[in-house]
Amino acid sequence: MPTKKPEMNQDDALKQLRHMARERAFGQRIGSDRLIQAGLDALIAGVDSPSLAMLAGLLRSEEPEAPELFDRVLEELGLGFHPPDDPREAKWAMAYWIAEQIADGSLDPPAGTHLIWTDIAYDLGFPEDLEPLVNCGHNLVGWEESWGVSVEELENEAIEAAKQFLSKRTPGESKG
């Protein structure tokens, strides 16, 4: 039996748009269909911007227009995000963003720690500040039942490591 997707409120819709803005800014490819659906979700939730209805109403043949319209919607809503120009600073910004998602439960700890390990820590030369998250990633990828510790316990350790990492952020470091 199909389950009905819960209705999104304005805050949820804006959070989804903000999240997708960061995904795209950090180089993740998001299909036009997802951009259009996010526009539709926002429109139905009562979000208003001049370009939102155009984004939400794009037809399949118009999908190539979605990225540009999505960017316009973000700017109109003040949700635009641009990572730092310096590649190292951008990697650190991405680490904080991923850690925030692990800590708030919006990103699965195994997926998040793996991203930090392979996409960030590696490129930064495995800095000490990321070591606990990288270790959690190693443990979650290599977990075996014989270890005597559950995956849930390892996931909770990853969440705590993310919270610890975020607590060490200096005031000058921007929130993701």
Image (cartoon, helix red, strand yellow):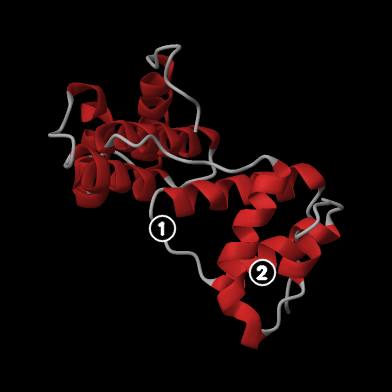
Residue at the spot of label 2: 36
User: Mark 1 or mark 2: which comes first in sequence?
Assistant: 1
Q: Residue at x 45, y 49 (%)?
A: 25
Q: For residue 151, which numbered disc appears in the image?
A: none
Relative to 32, is 165 on the left or the right? left
Residue 99 in the image: above or below residue 144: above
Relative to 173, is 79 on the left or the right? right
Q: Position of residue 78 (x, y in %)?
A: 68, 39
Q: Residues within 10 Å of mark 2 (few under 14, many from 20)?
A: many
Q: Residue at x 56, y 72 (%)?
A: 32
Q: Amino acid at mark 1?
A: Gln
> What is the tally of numbered marks visible in this picture?
2
Residue 127 in the image: above or below residue 170: below
Per the model, the C-alpha gap separating discs 1 and 2 is 16 Å
* Farthest bottom residue in view: 61
Relative to 173, is 132 on the left or the right? left
Residue in the foreground of this view, choosing between 140 and 148? 140
Q: Position of residue 86 (x, y in %)?
A: 29, 34
Residue in the foreground of this view, choosing between 25 and 144? 25
Q: Secondary structure at mark 1?
A: loop
Q: Secondary structure at mark 2?
A: helix
Quarter of the picture holding the N terminus = bottom right
Q: Residue at x 77, y 74 (%)?
A: 57
Q: Amino acid at mark 2?
A: Ile
Say if residue 144 shows up in the picture: no
Q: Residue at x 47, y 54 (%)?
A: 24
Residue 40 in the image: above or below residue 117: below
Q: Position of residue 134 (x, y in %)?
A: 23, 36
Residue at the spot of label 1: 28
* Farthest left residue in view: 125
Relative to 61, is 5 on the left or the right? right
Say if residue 47 shows up in the picture: yes
